[in-house]
Image: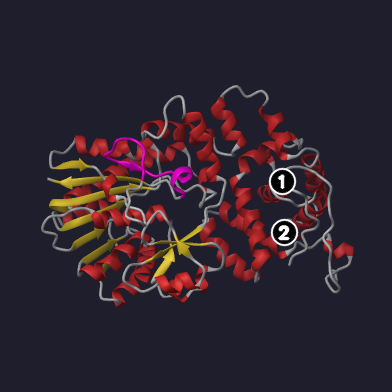
């Protein structure tokens, strides 16, 4: 295990107890060498932050970096928590760092700033004692950035260590009178995101003006608490017994969902073979709702209009093999279409008739009008419903993204309706509760057409026991919430072509 120093009790700066070490556990390095060498866990966390700054997705990049550093067990867990916690709490930590430095955060070299953020998380978010956090982070700076910034990193982090997290929050928020700005700082979200989530809680019927403050804080807290790893057992492919034998337990939210408390899902044969996969339970409910919709004279022609990277298409394809249906999985980006092909291979081996196409989804309705019975539009969106699994997304998105995504979402939904035969259904979904990506899109598209009508999607959402999944509001759309359903914040709307 990487030497991370002594442990500090949770909740403050109580008496420290040294970690007892057995014979042979002392480092063979001389003190001068230890001061200049980053340990593998911290180095991996730093490499992930730099990859994210260059545009990578943390959940896709981290497994590769862990394998490269040959980290497992407690070291892998520490690297994961250090990196993900730093990404989540970046907003708060940047404010603390600004108060501890005579150099504005935006004028600090990005590489040095990421080192400081990692140090701040160790001091304020983890139980790493001050001296170990500061010395190890200075070593990280020397190892990854160079000898020059070491003194600066040391000085700033020693100022950070003068107060614990609660004291810093109290100092930084004492002059904030706007409750939204205060929540944004305390829970480390951009202010515009917090305002949008507040409006969404009210707009989707989850909160009233009186309760929204409490609900909003619970939602923000949920975004900062890593969700349990959830797997999908694709129907008819025989993965359930293997998942149970590996320690996974049935997830209550969706009939196909399994929670894996620990372990590497990639080590499971069912996952490697595509009979199971990592997939959020709310995402599974979206695909199951498409399958549960009543379609008179269903001829078994299904379309996933925006299929990449293939999670929902994988569940649909497995069901298609059971029902003898035909699935077209379409994706506009060739490299994502390749991922879809890999995902659907197991269902094809089980007999599913699957075609993966690379095309602009906005044109499919004109190319194949009235060709499908069931259509899924899992539209590109800001991803504000998946902030607990994608910690970098809150900092990567801006309000300007809504202006670009809105027309695309409307065009994709209109194309899906054109591609649906009379009597068939379209399920529009986003991994975002933002009203501009959800209800406003559906309302605008329906307002321009007289050949489609909304239907209540809520009865199609059934948990593992077959009971209705409780959702707020009175329909016909449904919004899932991380703090209520323990899943991503998926929005669902069901439209029938008339």
- Would residue 108 appear left or right of 195 to someone viewing this image? right
- Please identify the quadrant where the N terminus is shown: bottom right
Residue linked to disc 2: 144
Residue 300 drawn at (x, y percent) = 17, 63
Name the one closer to the observer, 155 or 328.
328
What is the number of the mark on residue 120?
Answer: 1
Magenta extent: 470-486
SS label for mark 2: helix
Q: Is residue 480 shown in magenta? A: yes
Q: Position of residue 362 (x, y in %)?
A: 25, 51
Q: Is residue 130 left or right of residue 188?
A: right
Position of residue 392 in the picture relative to residue 293 (left or right): right
Q: Please state the horizontal and vertical placement of residue 307, each as a whole percent of the image.
A: 33, 59
Residue at 24% x, 42% y is: 456
Check the picture and name the quadrant holding the C terminus.
top left
Quick check: is 177 in the magenta stretch?
no
- Along the line of sight, which residue is nearer the eye, 352 or 119? 352
Which is more foreground, mark 1 or mark 2? 1
Residue placed at 56% from the left, 67% from the top?
263
Crowding near pointer 1: few (<14 within 10 Å), some, many (20+)? many
Q: Is residue 104 something one can see in this rendering?
A: no
Q: Residues within 10 Å of mark 2 (few under 14, many from 20)?
A: some
Task: Say if residue 457 shows up in the picture.
Answer: yes
As measured in the structure, the alpha-carbon distance from the residue carrying label 1 to the one carrying label 2 is 17 Å
Q: Position of residue 174 (x, y in %)?
A: 68, 25
Compared with residue 426, is residue 258 higher up or lower down, i.e. above or below?
below
């Amino acid at each position: 295990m990487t030497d991370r120093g002594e442990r500090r009790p949770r909740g403050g700066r109580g008496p420290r107890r040294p970690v007892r070490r057995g014979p042979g556990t002392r480092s063979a390095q001389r003190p001068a060498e230890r001061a200049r060498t980053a340990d593998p866990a911290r180095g991996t966390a730093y490499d992930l932050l730099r990859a994210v700054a260059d545009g990578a997705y943390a959940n896709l990049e981290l497994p590769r970096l862990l394998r490269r550093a040959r980290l497992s067990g407690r070291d892998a867990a520490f690297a994961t928590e250090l990196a993900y916690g730093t990404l989540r709490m970046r907003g708060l930590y940047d404010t603390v760092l600004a108060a501890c430095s005579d150099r504005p955060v935006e004028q600090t070299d990005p590489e040095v700033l990421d080192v400081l953020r990692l140090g701040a998380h160790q001091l304020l978010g983890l139980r790493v004692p001050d001296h170990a956090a500061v010395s190890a982070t200075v070593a990280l700076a020397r190892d990854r950035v160079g000898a020059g910034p070491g003194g600066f990193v040391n000085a700033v982090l020693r100022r950070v260590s003068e107060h614990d997290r609660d004291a810093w929050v109290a100092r930084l928020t004492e002059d904030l009178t706007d409750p939204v700005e205060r929540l944004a700082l305390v829970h480390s979200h951009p202010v515009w995101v917090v305002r949008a989530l507040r409006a969404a809680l009210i707009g989707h019927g989850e909160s009233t003006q009186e309760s929204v403050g409490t609900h909003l804080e619970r939602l923000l807290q949920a975004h900062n608490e890593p969700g349990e790893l959830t797997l999908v057992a694709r129907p008819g492919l025989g993965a359930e017994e293997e998942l149970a034998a590996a320690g996974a337990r049935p997830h209550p939210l969706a009939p196909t969902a399994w929670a894996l408390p620990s372990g590497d899902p990639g080590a499971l044969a069912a996952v490697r073979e595509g009979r199971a996969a990592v997939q959020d339970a709310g995402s599974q409910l979206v695909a199951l709702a498409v399958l549960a919709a009543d379609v008179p004279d269903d001829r078994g022609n299904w379309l996933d209009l925006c299929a990449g990277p293939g999670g929902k298409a994988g569940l649909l394809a497995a069901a298609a093999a059971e029902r003898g249906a035909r699935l077209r999985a379409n994706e506009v980006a060739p490299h994502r279409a390749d991922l879809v092909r890999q995902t659907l291979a197991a269902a094809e081996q089980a007999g599913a008739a699957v075609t993966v196409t690379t095309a602009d989804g906005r044109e499919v309705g004109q190319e194949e009008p009235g060709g499908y019975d069931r259509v899924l539009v899992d539209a590109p969106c800001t991803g504000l419903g998946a902030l607990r699994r994608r910690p970098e997304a809150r900092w990567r998105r801006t309000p300007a993204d809504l202006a670009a995504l809105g027309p695309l979402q409307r065009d994709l939904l209109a194309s899906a309706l054109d591609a649906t035969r009379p009597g068939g259904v379209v399920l529009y979904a986003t991994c975002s509760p933002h009203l501009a990506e959800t209800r406003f899109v559906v309302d605008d598209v329906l307002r321009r057409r007289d050949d489609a009508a909304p239907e209540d999607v809520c009865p199609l959402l059934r948990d593992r026991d077959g009971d209705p999944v409780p959702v707020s509001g009175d329909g016909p759309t449904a919004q899932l919430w991380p703090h209520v359903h323990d899943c991503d914040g998926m929005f669902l709307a069901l439209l029938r072509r008339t």
